Image (cartoon, rainbow, N blue to C red):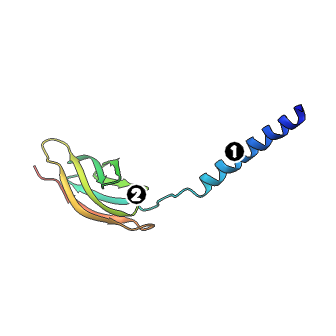
Amino acid sequence: MRLIYTRSKYTFWIFLGLLTFLSLAFSFYYNSPVKGSVSPSNGASRAWLISRRDTLNAPVIQGNFMITNVKPGNYTLMLEAKPPFRDSFKQDVLVVEGQPTDVGVIEMNQ
């Protein structure tokens, strides 16, 4: 009786490990970065990508930003300004799976 319990216990752990491995192996990884820069370079602190289903962000470092692992879709880009500048927006940023999206230079207004 004890032997059967031990065998089923090992079978359960092997099955659970295999299931975990397969779920990680087939998980989706989106390699579609969105990058750009701001002018002046000290005008923004953070870049945000906003859609109905997702919100992603990354810091602006020396005037440049890159938001990684973006799902394909249509987004609004928001640059969070540092005073005395105002937040800046760019509508309809289209992200295609597996391709980087360069939004160019975003001017920060006072």
- 18 or 5: nearer the viewer: 5
Q: Which mark is residue 16?
A: 1
- 36 or 17: nearer the viewer: 17
Q: Quadrant of the N terminus?
A: top right
Secondary structure found at label 1? helix
Residue drawn at (31%, 66%) of the image: 94
Crowd rating for badge 1 (residues with CA inside 10 Å; few <14, some 14–19, many 20+): few
Q: Position of residue 47 (x, y in %)?
A: 29, 50
Judged left or right of residue 7, residue 73 is left
Mark before the other along the chain sequence, 2 or 1: 1
Secondary structure found at label 2? loop
Q: Which mark is residue 70?
A: 2
The outermost residue toward the left is 110
Crowd rating for badge 2 (residues with CA inside 10 Å; few <14, some 14–19, many 20+): many
Judged left or right of residue 74, residue 84 is left
Are the residues at dot 2 and dot 1 in contact (C-beta closer than 8 Å)?
A: no
Type of amino acid at the residue the image marks with label 1: Leu
Q: Position of residue 91 (x, y in %)?
A: 22, 61
Q: Position of residue 71 (x, y in %)?
A: 41, 59
Res 10 quadrant in image: top right
Judged left or right of residue 99, residue 89 is left
Judged left or right of residue 104, residue 73 is right
Residue drawn at (40%, 57%) of the image: 70
Q: Which mark is residue 103?
A: none
The outermost residue toward the top is 2
The outermost residue toward the front is 1
- 15 or 31: nearer the viewer: 15
Type of amino acid at the residue the image marks with label 2: Val
